[in-house]
Image (cartoon, rainbow, N blue to C red):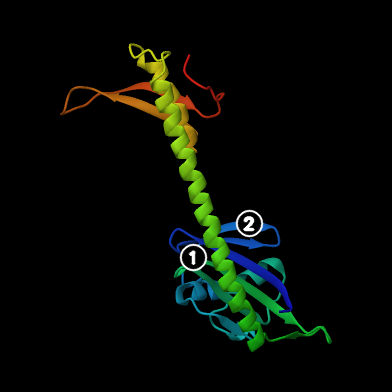
Amino acid sequence: VGGDRCAFFKVEDAGKTIVAHLEGVYARMKLSAQDGIVGWVAKNRELVNIPSAYDDPRFNGEVDKASGYKTQSLLCFPIIAARELVGIAQLVNKTDRGTGRIVPFTRDDEDTVTAFGKAAGVCMRNCKLHEDLVRQQARLEDVARIATHLSSSDSDFTKPRPILEFIARVVGNSAGAARCLFYQVGDSDLSPDLQLVATSDQAEEDDEGPP
């Protein structure tokens, strides 16, 4: 469509957070209806075509001030999959190929990006489903790993600490945690005592089982 720049925003946390991607720049930010055109599109889920950005009260020029770039024409649209907002794309400064001048985006441009948004939404949803399946498979493998060790002849249940340390390593790795701690609760209901019985730092070597 002849835009000079294109920014893509991935929506996360049920629409509360967006992850911005622009020419190699990666940033996380909280999303609200006050976050310029992107925030408005996220809230209303409607395409916005603005011939002159600074004439629109919804436009936030802080990014231009920080970068030295000047936004003139702007086209921003939602990316929706299965009725869920998954992303937002924003094109700026459509350039006429003949004159090199910045011109407004056209109705044909709107139709083009709308079709692109639908295709992108399907792709993003499929990627998310694949990521979910990979994570679920990894968790199942971790559970099987623990069960296999507990049923092996090497497991000495008279010495639970090595077993718990092994489980701590597996659970910590599965959750992406830097450390996993197991505490034993005392017998007193009124004032239970907590005793640290096992710990695992994920920076340690990835043992296949307790010693």
Question: Image point 67% across, 66% down: which residue?
Answer: 66
Disc on the earlier residue, 2 or 1: 2
Measured from the top left, where is residue 56 in percent x and y? 57, 84
Q: Pick whichever, 103 or 32, lies toward us.
A: 103
Q: Which residue is mark 1?
A: 31
Q: Which residue is mark 2?
A: 26
**Is residue 175 in sight in this rendering?**
no
Under mark 2, the amino acid is: Tyr
Number of dots carrying numbers: 2
Q: Report the front residue among 54 and 201.
A: 201
Q: Any mark on residue 75, and which?
A: none
Q: Secondary structure at mark 1?
A: loop
| Residue 107 point in image, percent of width and height | 63, 88
Q: Is residue 47 above or below residue 124?
A: below
Q: Amino acid at mark 1?
A: Leu
Left or right: residue 24 versus residue 34 is right
Q: Kindly report the distance in space between the C-alpha atoms of the residues bearing marks 2 and 1.
A: 15 Å
Assign a secondary structure to mark 2. Answer: strand
